[in-house]
Image (tube, grey):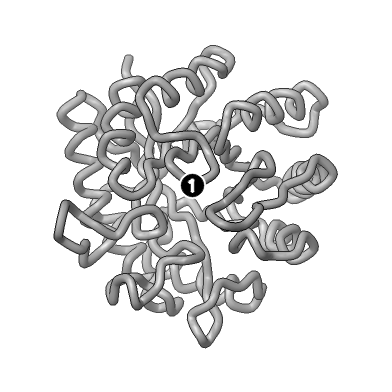
Amino acid sequence: MTAPLVVTVAPTGADTSRERTPHVPILPGEIAREAGASAAAGASVIHIHVRDDEGRSTMDLGRYREAVAAVREAAPQLLINLTTAGSWRMEEPDRLAVVALRPDMCSFDAGTLNFGDGVFLNPPPFLRALAEACLEHGVQPELECFDISHVEACLRLADEGLLAQPLWFQFVMGIPGGIAATPRNLLHLAGLLPEGTAWSAIGVGRAQVPMTTLAIAAGGHVRVGMEDNIMLRRGELATSNAQFVERAVALGALAGRPAATPEQARQIVLGAAPA
């Protein structure tokens, strides 16, 4: 039986600015409205970044509490996934602290890489500390892999008992400095996983639709939203994150994979028993 499609929406991100698009949600209320519309369109997971008063990425716990409370009120069914990166400039203690808020999930950026003109540091001691924090607080790490070695690093941590089953991988395709968004690369990454392991894919920018389509066809899941892409199609800005969700859901339906309900997503992503 083909698995239903888990659609994650990433409405804000660390770097998408109002200068690039006036439609990116930044304030907690704006993020909550996008959460509600995306849930109605078929999303079952929301990946949250927050901003300070100047619109800059922050790991301030008060801001996260405010945003999570607003999202839970607007779309209580959604799984909450908080970033532990904020951006590649954040300090390790601030990145670790967000796990104590006990979201359903958090990002686990699985290795160091060049990121545009910067370096996104994720050294092994930090990853072990993050894995231990996830175990302590009962949070599912979303294993974000920007390259092949990141997959192998996660599998080693799982062998060491630092990552609990079921594993949930996410392949980030098309970041400058990471693996290119090509069909061959995506299928190779998926082929590195133990049989039955669930995975999702992100295509950055113009790669969003091709990687979404291939991931659906290959049995994976998808993430869409203004963190990764602001253009609905060539020459047309998206005006809401729900538009990206609607398109992913439509592609899934064409492939015989209806959008997962939040309960189904909890089973697929978290291994939760049916209610």
Which sits in the foreground, 149 or 197? Answer: 149
Q: Amino acid at mark 1?
A: Pro
Which sits in the foreground, 252 or 192? Answer: 192
SS state under label 1: loop
Q: Quadrant of residue 101?
A: bottom right
Q: Is residue 55 above or below residue 43?
A: below
Horizontal side, residue 63 vs residue 101: left or right: left
Instruction: Name the residue rendered at 53%, 31% in the picture.
Output: 273
Label 1 Cα neighbours within 10 Å, binned few <14 / some 14-19 / many ≥20: some
Q: Is residue 51 above or below residue 88?
A: below
Query: In the rendering, at what x and y percent does residue 138 appear?
Result: 70, 46
Which sits in the foreground, 19 or 46? Answer: 19
Instruction: Name the residue rendered at 57%, 57% in the picture.
Output: 117
Horizontal side, residue 42 vs residue 85: left or right: left
Which sits in the foreground, 108 or 233? Answer: 233
Q: Quadrant of residue 215?
A: top left
Query: In the rendering, at what x and y percent does residue 1 appear?
Result: 32, 14
Instruction: Name the residue rendered at 65%, 52% in the picture.
Output: 120
Horizontal side, residue 217 vs residue 137: left or right: left
Q: Is residue 255 above or below residue 168?
A: above
Query: In the rendering, at what x and y percent does residue 51 appear?
Result: 52, 76
User: Label 1 belongs to which residue?
Assistant: 176
Residue found at the very far front of the displayed protein: 117
Horizontal side, residue 7 vs residue 137: left or right: left
Query: In the rendering, at what x and y percent does residue 58 appear?
Result: 61, 73
Residue found at the very far bottom of the displayed protein: 53
Total labels drawn: 1
Instruction: Name the residue rendered at 37%, 72% in the picture.
Output: 25
